[in-house]
Every structure is written in C-alpha cells, then in structure tokens.
Image (cartoon, coloured by chain):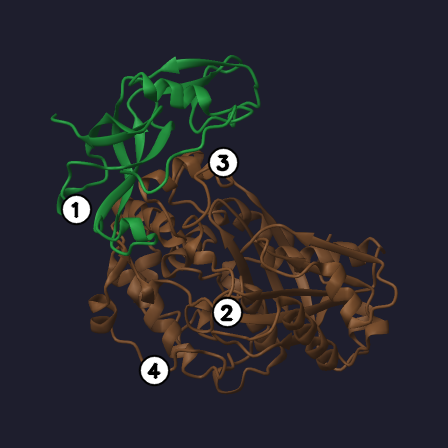
Amino acid sequence: MAPFVPVPDILTQPYWDGCRNHVITVQQCRSCGRKRHRPAAGCHWCGGQDVDWVELSGRGSLYTYTVVHRAFHPSLADEVPYVVGLVAAEEDPTVRFHTRILECDPADVRVGMQLEVLFREETDGIVLPYWRPRAA
Amino acid sequence: MLRDKCAIVGLGYTPFSSKSGVTTEMLAVEACQNAMADAGLKPSDVDGLLTYHMGDSAPVQVVASSLGIRELRWYNEIAQGGPGNCAVILEAAMAVMAGLAETVICYRAMNGRSGQRAGETGAAGKAAGEMQFLMPYGIIGVPVWYSMWARHHMATYGTTREHYGHVAIAQRQWAMNNERSFNRDPLTMDEYLATPLIADPLSRLDCCREIDGGCAIIVTSAERARNLRQPPVYIRGGAYGMGPGGGRNYEKWEDYSQLFSHYVGPRVWQSAGLGPGDMNFAQIYDAYSFVVVHQLEDFGFCAKGEGGPLVASGVTAPGGSLPLNTGGGMLNEGYLNGLNVVAEAVTQLRGQAGVRQVADAEVGLVSGFGGPQGSAMVLRK
C-alpha cells in the first residue's frame, strides 16, 4: 500500500483516469506534436497549450534510480530498502515517470534496464502505476 | 552591466546551532544588526531589505520594522532556496544601480533544524500538486530525489562513491579550521565508505547539516563602499536562471548530469569577463557532496565527466591549486541555504579567514544550486 494516495487535480485527472483503465496516458501538444509528463498547462518544448491525451505502450527503460535505505515516513519503515526511479517511455525517452520499481532486488537494479508498467489498485478509484523488469 | 559597480560592505552572523530557541524574526534581526556593526552603518543608513526563503522565515517587512529602518525604499522576498544566495546579492546590486535604494541588507534566517526541515520535504501533507507523482512511491525527503541525480552521473560518466567521498574529505580538512563548523574531526575514506546509506549513493556524510541560524550581507554602491569600515568586495559579474524543462518538473529536466551551471556558467564568465582559470578559489553550493563535482564540470574547471577525478587529485583541499569551500561548506558548517557560502567568499576576499586564508585571494566564484535552476557570481577584492 502506498504511503500516500495521489490527489488528482483538473490538470492531472485524465492521467489518473487512464491508470484506472490500466493505460498510461500523456498529453501530446497539438502545436509541435511532442508528448509530455507530468501534465502541465503548456508545452515545455514550444509553449503550445492545446493537447490531445494519447496512450503509451507501458514499456520503457530506467533513466536513473535510487535504493532508499532510510524511511522518511513511518509507513515506509518496513519497506526499506526499496527501489524508486525515473522511467523513460519507449516511444519518447524524454517522457519520464517517477515510480517505485517492483519485483526487482535492489542488488539487480541498473540504469538502462528494460521495464514494463504494472497497475495496482490502492484505494477506491485510485490505481497507481508501478514498473517492473521486463524480459528482453 | 554589473561589473564592479556595487560592493559587499557588511557581513553578520548569528550563532549556528541545532536549536536556536528564538524565532526567525529574531535571528534575522540579530544577523542584520551584526552586519551593520561590521560595516559601520546605522539603521538610518539602510534603505533596502531583501531575503529569500521557502515559507520558513519571517516576512521582510516585519524584520525592517524591528531593525528600526524608518523609511524603507525598496524591499522584496525571493521565493526559493539555494539559487537565492547569489540572486539576492545580484538583485540588491540591480536595485542600487537603478537608484531604487542605496544600501541593501540581504539576509537569510531559518530554524532549519528545530523548525521546518528542508530535508524532509514531502514527508507530510497531501500528495497533491507535484507531490502526487512522488509521495505515493515513497519518493519522500530531498536526499531521495537528489540521489537519483548522482546515480545518473555515475552511470553516464563512471563517477564513483569514492569521488564524492573526496569532496567530503577535502571539505572536512577546510572545516577543521572554521570555528563555526560542527564537524572538526578528520574524515577518512574508510569512514566515509562505511557510513550507512540514506538513499544510494548518499550517506549522511554526503548531505549538508541542517541548522538554525542567520546571516546577513550588505550591498551598496562602489562609491559609498570606499568610505566604509571594511575593505570592499566588488560584485564583478553574475547570472542566474534555469535550463530547459527545468524547475521542479524533474521528469522534464533534459539531462540530469547537467545542472543549472551548464546554462548559467558561460553567462557568469561572460558577465565577469573572466574564466575558471582566473579564480583563486571557488565557493560552490554544497547541499550535497555530488553537486560540487557536477558544478565543477559545468563551470568549466574540467571537462564533463572529469569532476570526480579532479576532486580525487586533491586540488580542492587546503594547499591545492583550486581551494574549494574553504570554510568546510554547508556539509560541515550547516545549511543556511547558501548565504554562508557567499559569506565565506567575502571573508576570504577581505583577507579575514585566519588560518584557512587562501594566500593572495583576489577573485573567486560563488554558486547557488537548485538543480536545473541556480545562480552564480564572481566577487573580487
């Protein structure tokens, strides 16, 4: 169980709605065509403000990570050591997601490792995407 | 153009502690009063006041009132952390050059240990806003976010924990001669490597010490500076800003191994008309050991990826050719959000650093780090 559940807002609700349907969705700029995450009021590539929400495959690679040894919240005391990281989407590696890496021994985590998304229901209506190693 | 038109003329501290027992307003007032005494100025000689903070300090107007500044002509608060250290000095110079104020006190006051602790950001409250993408995963506490930046550099350039350890060890050597430092004992590589990790690759020896305290620095025109008590320290040049993606949008930060300094570095050198080879020392914002290595590369003290070997070569330690964080840095003196990093540069350029004085220190670099955003300036005597 996650230590905190996300509190969606009007900008991020479509992303969390996608998660509830077990798909990763991101904003795609109608001006320049670039995809982005996290959701934002404007495109950091061109400033365009109109978007379409598009689905990604849920495959990616690990851009960077850390193994957390100290619990900064009491609910994490039994979780340490755990692995968190930043995942680069297969379709566009500049589209990245912070996440917890599951099903991965801390000794085995490597930058560049191939990952796939894994959805878990946390509480009513909130589904969190996690990522785990993917066979080559 | 900034070049040498303004100068730093006053410097004041409160004691640094783990529990000040006073409010941030009281810390601010004490630091500002000490800076005025250092400069030989009275409250009536000051007409500008500026601070930066992260919602953890007293309002600037309250501090102005308690200082007895009867007519404040210019004031502001910059809502940010590390980059604020050089930003306040540069903003004060801008205000003086624009004629909005003549003499500006810049200060930072915080109960960063006994009160609101920056290092635990994200450990309380709701997972809303930017935190909705971090807190649910246990990405809580600043060392957890930042450790991923170090890991990216290690994976890209082969930087090692030992390289970061050399930052901590060299700075500890400097800290042994700083009476404000909390850490005065020598540090060995064995001890560094044996210290338990907080978030891989960072242990507590890679993280600055959170403290309570205040620091104030007074900026005025070069003309007025020449008639005051202390030797003037001139603001030679400066720059601040943010790289693409940037901000707190760490998902969108294009290249984790390039800090703000990749963008601000060339502009600070252009502003100063000087380069890294001209510096007699560098005071590099060191909230974490690894950000020193990455900034040294970005500022051009070595090629990208060679910051680890550069520090390991010993040049940044006492006696080396690139004296760096000569008070021991925030790793040892404590996290005053970097205004103490500026203050150490001023102390060196005045020739008042005592046993840790860098011989013939005439010009040095100071930086303020916040990841993809940050600040830097060149100060000279």
- Is A98 positioned to the left or the right of B287 in the image? left
Q: Which residue is mark 2?
A: B281
Question: Who comes first in sequence, dot 3 or dot 4?
Answer: 3
SS class, disc 1: helix
Residue A24 in view of the camera: no
Question: Who comes first in sequence, dot 2 or dot 4?
Answer: 4
Q: Quick one: quadrant of the C terminus of chain A?
A: top left
Q: CA distance from mark 2 to mark 1?
A: 40 Å
Residue B197, by quadrant, is: bottom left
The percent position of residue A103, horizontal first and vertical second, equals 15, 36
Residue B41 in view of the camera: yes
In the figure, what tint was chain A given?
green
**Residue type (three-letter) at the residue carrying disc 1:** Pro
The percent position of residue A121, horizontal first and vertical second, equals 27, 27
Residue B87, by quadrant, is: bottom right
Q: CA distance from mark 3 to mark 2?
A: 40 Å
Badge 1 sits on which subunit? A
Report crowding for label 2: few under 14, some 14 to 19, many 20 or more residues within 10 A (C-alpha).
many
Q: Nearer the viewer, mark 3 or mark 2?
A: 3
Chain letter for the brown part: B
**Residue type (three-letter) at the residue carrying disc 4:** Asp
* Viewer-closest of B79 and B20: B20
| Residue A106, numbered label | 1
Q: Which residue is mark 4?
A: B185
